[in-house]
Amino acid sequence: MIVSYNSKDLFKNCLESVYKFTKDLEFEVIVVDNASTDGVTDYLKSQISPASPELGRGRANIKDTNQKSNLKAIFSEENLGFSRGNNVGIKEAKGKYVLLLNNDTELLENSIERMKLWMDAHQDVAVVSCQLVNSEHKASATGGFFPRLHNVIAWGWFLDDLPILRNYFPSYHPHPGPMYDKEQFLDWVTGAFFFVRKAAIDQVGMFDENIFMYGEELEWCIRFKKAGWKIGYTPITKVVHHERGSQGGLPKGAILGEFRGLKYIYGKHYPGWMQVALGTVLDVAAFLRVVLWLVRLKPQMAKIFLEALLL
């Protein structure tokens, strides 16, 4: 399951790597194209048969759907975002498992089969992710802890950057490091490679579409864990994640999306006093970053965090 939005070359590499390395496994590939404008749509249409049966006729915001072999493409008339886009595709998924794969990822080996076998052996797990590496093949952060106030403070106030204090104030999304060298259960894992059990989706529902992008996988994992499922992480296989490769430019969307996502999650899952406290914690975090980027003579970044402060 891939949601595509521009970044044609990255998307093409991602799709080709899935077909190259996924062997001896029955699978389908569902792509939801969020009204790409850089040639992704034309590339997808060249890979499918225009004579194939349609899947989504009449659904809101969907104008064309075709199928060829095990590749299904759904073309949206607008950018649905990560949550809505994935939900559209999940509704069409027929398998026991659904792999949500970012369009800026790239398989290096038969990762999907390895993760399927891992999930078969861990029936109490709703979601698992593997080790993500960056373009230089160095390990990336792949998940972490729920955003309890002390975890958000550690991240927002830079306490997790201090060698000693980081042991006492773990961030809700830890830095890359030895943490990701071992198999473990976490509170949440990143949506870049999100291998989820369909039975768990049927139990708790799909992505919360009130979150356009950033924080949606975190919120989903909260619901999975509340329902009694575990969230797994295993380094048995590696997948390249060209982080933010599908966005380009300054990471404004990621920054503002994270701030909005945290506030929404607190409004949905935490008591009122904690929502007020979170607002204060995030205001301090944004202010610290405004000062930091001004000192570093990066006024554009400072402006983004000023906007976060005013949310």
Image: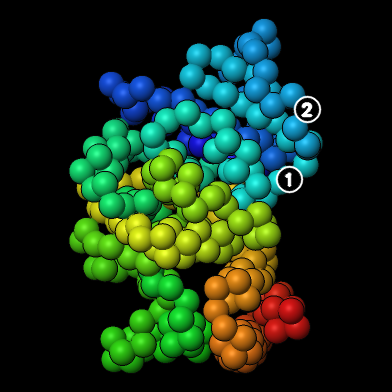
SS class of the residue under badge 1?
loop
Query: Which amino acid, by three-letter code, is at mark 2?
Result: Gly
Q: How many marks?
A: 2
Ranked by sequence position, the earlier of labels 2 and 1 is: 2
Q: Nearer the viewer, mark 2 or mark 1?
A: 2
Q: Position of residue 227 (x, y in %)?
A: 41, 60
Q: Position of residue 12 (x, y in %)?
A: 54, 31
Look at the image and tell me whether residue 2 can be seen: yes
Quadrant in the picture for residue 255: bottom right
Query: Which amino acid, by three-letter code, is at mark 1?
Result: Asn
Which residue bears the numbered disc 1?
79
Q: Nearer the viewer, residue 81 or 307?
A: 81
Tell me if residue 296 comes above or below residue 184 in the rendering.
below
Residue, x 35% and y 57% (percent of image)? 229
Which residue bears the numbered disc 2?
58
> In which quadrant of the rendered image does the C terminus lie?
bottom right
Mark 2 crowd level (few <14, some 14–19, many ≥20, 10 Å Cα): few
Q: Position of residue 281 (x, y in %)?
A: 57, 89
Residue, x 48% and y 44% (percent of image)? 202
Labelled pair 2, 1 in contact (Cβ < 8 Å): no
Residue, x 46% and y 81% (percent of image)? 148
Residue, x 54% and y 50% (percent of image)? 205
Left or right relative to 28: residue 269: right
Look at the image and tell me whether residue 12 can be seen: no
Mark 1 crowd level (few <14, some 14–19, many ≥20, 10 Å Cα): some
The color scheme shown is: rainbow
Left or right relative to 107: residue 120: left
Q: Position of residue 50 (x, y in %)?
A: 68, 11
Left or right relative to 114: residue 229: right
CA separation in Å, label 2 and label 1: 17 Å
